[in-house]
Each structure stands twice: as structure tokens, then as C-alpha cells.
Amino acid sequence: MTTTVNRGAILMGLAYLGLVVFIILFCGWRTPAYDDFAKYWGLFGTIVGVVTGAIPAYFFKTQADKNDQRAKEESRRADREAQKAQLYAGAASGPEAQQIAESNPELFEVEGSRP
């Protein structure tokens, strides 16, 4: 199983972790007591929480966009194959086409025609 490594995503994740550590250390350096630290962290913690939530949302959206594109390509490919099958079926000679239809009736049923 091969995996593709997105170096940009790894660098952004590490940079974000570094930023959070810096904020924690900054708050610790600036405050002599825990109460003061809690005030600073309350200020920066909201921003950290919002960004922490936005990062996975970005990667999930990117993955969803890739999967959507892949699904569209597969749908186009399936449509082309169905058209080819119809053209080949139309080019088949009469008795052979009749024999195929009789041996595979489930493939030639028209929707809604079943009782």
C-alpha cells in the first residue's frame, strides 16, 4: 500500500503545534500566578480552538473534493461504456441478438413492465 505524503500539510501541522507551544510558553513567561495565566489562556485559547477546528475541516473538504472529482470521472467512464455496449448490441445480427435476449431476460426488462 503506497501513501502520498503531503509535505505542506505536515509542515503546517508542525508550525501550528509550534505556535500553540509558543502561546503557552508566552503566557507562562508573562504571568507570575496561575490566575493571570488563565486570563491570557482564555484570550488565546478561543483563537486556538477555532483554528484547531478549522484545520480538519479544510482537510476533509479537500479530500471530499478529490473524491467528488474521482466519482465524476468514473460516472463519465461508465456512461461511455454503456454507450459502447448499446452500439455493439445494435450492430449484432438478428438471431444472435434474439438468443442473447432470451438467455438473459433480466438484462432486457424495461423498468415498470414487471407485474
Image (cartoon, rainbow, N blue to C red):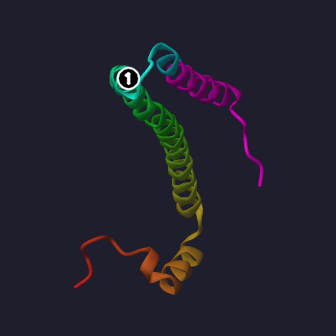
Which residue is at the front of the view, 46 or 79? 46
Q: Is residue 97 magenta?
A: no
Residue 37 percent location from the top left of the image: 40, 24
Q: Looking at the rendering, in which quadrant would you find the C terminus?
A: bottom left
Main SS class of the magenta portion in the image: helix
From the viewer's perspective, tell me whether residue 114 is left or right of residue 32: left
Closer-to-camera residue (16/104): 16
Q: Residue furthest front?
A: 32
Residue 61 relative to residue 15: left or right: left
Front residue of 42/38: it is: 38
Q: Residue at x 59, y 69 (%)?
A: 93
Tell me the residue at 42%/74% (across/down).
108
Q: Could you tell whether 29 is left or right of 38 in the image? A: right
When the figure is inspected, residue 112 is found, relative to residue 18, above or below; the finding is: below
- Mark 1 sits on what residue? 47
- Measuring from the top left, give residue 49's x and y in whole percent: 39, 31
34 to 107, vertically: above or below: above
Image point (49%, 79%), residue name: 101
Q: Nearer the viewer, residue 49 or 57?
A: 49
| Number of numbered tags placed on the structure image | 1
The secondary element bearing badge 1 is classed as helix
Q: In which quarter of the view is residue 14 placed?
A: top right
**Kind of residue at disc 1:** Ile
Percent across and percent down for residue 82 are 52, 56
Is residue 6 on the magenta stretch? yes
Q: Which residue is outermost to the left?
A: 115
Classify residue 40 by image quadrant.
top left
The magenta region covers 1-25
Instruction: State the quadrant of the N terminus.
Output: bottom right
